[in-house]
Structures are given as C-alpha cells and as structure tokens.
Image (cartoon, rainbow, N blue to C red):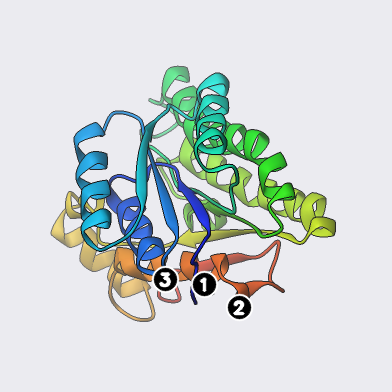
Amino acid sequence: MDLSNKIALVTGGASGIGRTISLELAKKHATVIVNYNRSREAADLLVQEIENMGGVALAIQADVSHYQDAERLIKTIIERFGVLHIVVNNAGITDDGLILRMTEEQFDRVIATNLKGVWNVCKHASKPLLKSGYGRLINISSVSGVLGNAGQSNYSSAKAGVIGMTKALAREFASRNVTVNAIAPGFIETDMTKKLPEDAVKAWAEQIPLKRFGKPEDVAHAVVFLASEEASYITGHTLEVDGGLVM
C-alpha cells in the first residue's frame, strides 16, 4: 500500500489517534498535512519526526468547527501543493454528562467540532478531491454513534451524524471515483481511556469479544487501507475497529 505522491490531510492530527494516523500515512510515503487547533508544539514535534524518517509534512493551525478556518486550511494546502488526495476527518472532542445535567453549551460545542467540523472540511475539500483523480475521504466516527452511550447524547449524536454524512457523500462523489468511508473505533488505548477507573476498563473489556482494548495503530492501519488503491471498490462503508464490540 504505497501512497507516494499523495497529499493527505489529517485533522486533529497532532495527538492521540490522529498522531498515529499521521505517522502511518507518512510511513507509506504520503505527504502529510498535520492540522491542529491548540497543540502547536505537538504538531511541530510530529512534523520533525516525520521529516527525520525521510518524509514530508506540514503543520497548519485551524479550528475546523469554524467554517472560515476550514476554508483557510484547504486553501493553504492547495496553494502549497496544488492538489489534495486524502482527507481524514479525525478532529473531535468530548464533553460528557447525563442529559439531565448537560448544558446547551456542552451539546453545541461537541456538535460544532465533531459534526459541523467534519462537514466544514468536507465542504471545502470536495472540489480538490473531485479534481484530484484520486480521492479518498475518511471520517472517524465511533461505536458510540452506532450503539449510543449513556452520558454521551451529544457525542453519540455527532458520531451517528458522521456516519449518515459519509453515506450521503459516498453517493454524491461516486461518479468521480472518490470514495467516502467511515471508521468507528471502539475502546482504544489513548490518554482519554487511561483516565477511566480500572473497574470500568475491566467491565468494558469483558463485553469485547477479543477481551482487550485496541491500540491507535489498529485504527491507523484501517485508515491506510481505506486510503489505498486496494480499497478502490469500497465506499459508503463504516468499518468498526472495535474487537467485535458491535456485532
């Protein structure tokens, strides 16, 4: 799965799962644009790491929840590279709470980043992708958007919306051979899951057929596959990377 000469954007690509996705794309020889909002130091360190591997990377700040920021992000990429082949919508936040206690601000903030932010990037990236001759749009959803999760009415709604958006865009872009797919990670070993109480980790692991949490590389490998030529006949699909949790 060689991605040489491909220009790839990873939103929220400086930390967590996004960082691993950026690294894996670079290992397959893609030029990687690492989008970040506030993690400038992490983004710069990642770009340096990719360059030390012999790869090409560029960090660009943008808050994708803002329409104009997403527009500037894509314009900057096109001005620099002239083309965009792969977009990975990974940027996301959580602000959990039972609906009885959740504020309107909590709901709006998560929807703005996790759903509207994906739409903003898709909107501005659509023309470059359709013109590229090789378009791959990959949206990171979640099993919370498939199963629902108590205390995450905002997050689950956003991630379910991402799956619906993925299917709609897959139909819109298919005639131009641009594939649009989603990945729904389950419980992945990240800084967020490390904060979970040990008994909660054990309880969730018991519900997973593989009896363990996944690693960021598991998600990143799925992204690389969907971004590759080998996945050219897959579109409108949601790939659950969850150890069998959703079955």
Disc 2 to disc 1: CB gap under 8 Å = yes
Looking at the image, which residue is at 49% across and 52% down? 8
Q: Position of residue 82 (x, y in %)?
A: 59, 42
Packing grade of label 2 (10 A; few <14, some 14-19, many >=20) is few
- In three-dimensional space, the C-alpha distance between marks 1 and 3, rounded to whole angstroms, equals 6 Å
25 left or right, relative to 141: left
Residue 221 is tagged as 3
Give the residue type that dot 2 points to. Glu
Looking at the image, which residue is at 21% across and 54% down? 49
Up-down: is 35 above or below 65? Answer: below
> In the image shown, does 206 or 19 lie closer to the viewer?
19
Looking at the image, which residue is at 44% across and 42% down? 11
Q: Visible in this render: residue 97? A: no
Residue 241 is tagged as none
Q: Visible in this render: residue 157? A: yes
> In the image shown, does 156 or 163 lie closer to the viewer?
163
Give the residue type that dot 1 points to. Phe
Residue 225 is tagged as 1
> In the image shown, does 52 or 145 lie closer to the viewer?
52
* Badge 1 element: helix
Q: Which residue is mark 2?
A: 230
* Badge 2 element: helix
Give the residue type that dot 3 points to. His
Between marks 2 and 3 in the image, the one whose residue lies nearer the viewer: 2
Disc 1 to disc 3: CB gap under 8 Å = yes
> In the image shown, does 15 or 100 lie closer to the viewer?
15
Q: Report the residue that reaches farthest toward the right.
A: 175
Q: Position of residue 133 (x, y in %)?
A: 71, 58
- In three-dimensional space, the C-alpha distance between marks 2 and 3, rounded to whole angstroms, equals 13 Å
Packing grade of label 1 (10 A; few <14, some 14-19, many >=20) is some
